[in-house]
Image (cartoon, helix red, strand yellow):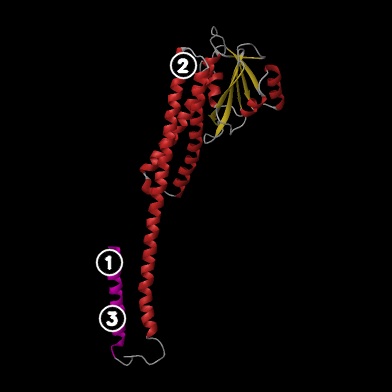
Amino acid sequence: MISFYKRTIKEKELKKINNFEKGCWINIIDPTKKELDYLIEEFDLDEQNLLSGLDPNEIPRVEFDDKTVYVIITIISPANKEEVHTCLIIITNDFILTLCRNKPEFMNDIIEGRTEFITTQKLKCLLTLLSKINKEFEKETNSIVKLVSSKKKSIGGLNEKDMNILLQQENILNSFVSAYYHTNLLYDRIIKNIRFYEQDKDIIEDLIIEAKQGLDLCQLSLKTITNIRNHLEISLSTKLNKVITLLTTLTIFISVPAAVSGLYGMNIVLPFQEHNYIFYLVLLTIIMIWIGLLLYFRKIVK
């Protein structure tokens, strides 16, 4: 679906228009093949870059083609906060264009007027979009960091369900780390190749700082999850060793009387079998063997 919006510096709000006008914002959500062909023919846009904007696995980057700037950036999926998608932002002399497979939440803030978006100021619009994307990543990153921190505090009471949650968050953090890393490279290239006003330059420098902080938070949380997993593995291994040791000890202690009683249960002539106290002698032998084993195990443990 293709929608056209426009707001000049003299107008108070963003308005939806029926057709393309110079200085407008073209917002495209899940376009058809026919709509993509229209964009290519009407505005002389690169087909491969348009297709890249619909690929959820595309790496963030920026490309420059004559007077057209293609910014391919990773965004939080509106349908599932645990997934990332791709958004394409195109800047030309005549318009700004956004293209996504699914409509991001921050688009609603812009369309409904909660965020200033003067479409004739295309570079400011670009910074607004990048800021919105940064804020969404920051919000989700902080949410995951809090969850991981809470699990860390209750590490002694974690169960299988908690570990599954942590592993799920680990997968999300890994995708965020990749997104943050390549977005930082994208910002660096943008600031080197596009001339911004000093105030706008400060904004994108702040975005770079925020993205680096987000990257550090994700890496720290990944390290925390790894430490929790290692702690649980050691704890489970220790418990398993204790159980095996206990079972081995019990097996040995049970096998001693079984062996002695089995020996004296054979249907052959045995020493002292006619003795009145042979039962107590056999029992005493078993007890002496037990004591010997206890002393031996105690020595090993020390």
Per the image, label 2 sits on a secondary structure element best described as: helix
Query: On the rendered structure, is 29 left or right of 106?
Result: right
Q: Position of residue 57 (x, y in %)?
A: 58, 34
Query: Could you tell me the amino acid type at mark 2?
Result: Lys
Of the numbered discs in the image, which one, if any, rests on residue 264? none
Query: Mark 1 highlights which residue?
Result: 299
Of mark 2 and mark 3, the one earlier in the sequence is 2
Provide the secondary structure element on which disc 1 rests: helix
Kindly identify which residue carries mark 2: 201
x and y percentages locating residue 202 in the rendered image: 44, 17
Could you give the CA–CA distance between mark 1 and mark 3, rounded to whole angstroms?
Answer: 23 Å
Is 294 a magenta residue?
yes
Q: Quadrant of residue 144 in the image? A: top left
- Residue interval drawn in magenta: 276-302
* 8 vs 134, nearest the viewer: 134
Residue tagged by mark 3?
284
Locate the N terminus and report the quarter of the image it occupies: top right
Residue kind at label 1, given as amino acid type: Lys
**Cα distance in 3D space between marks 2 and 3:** 91 Å
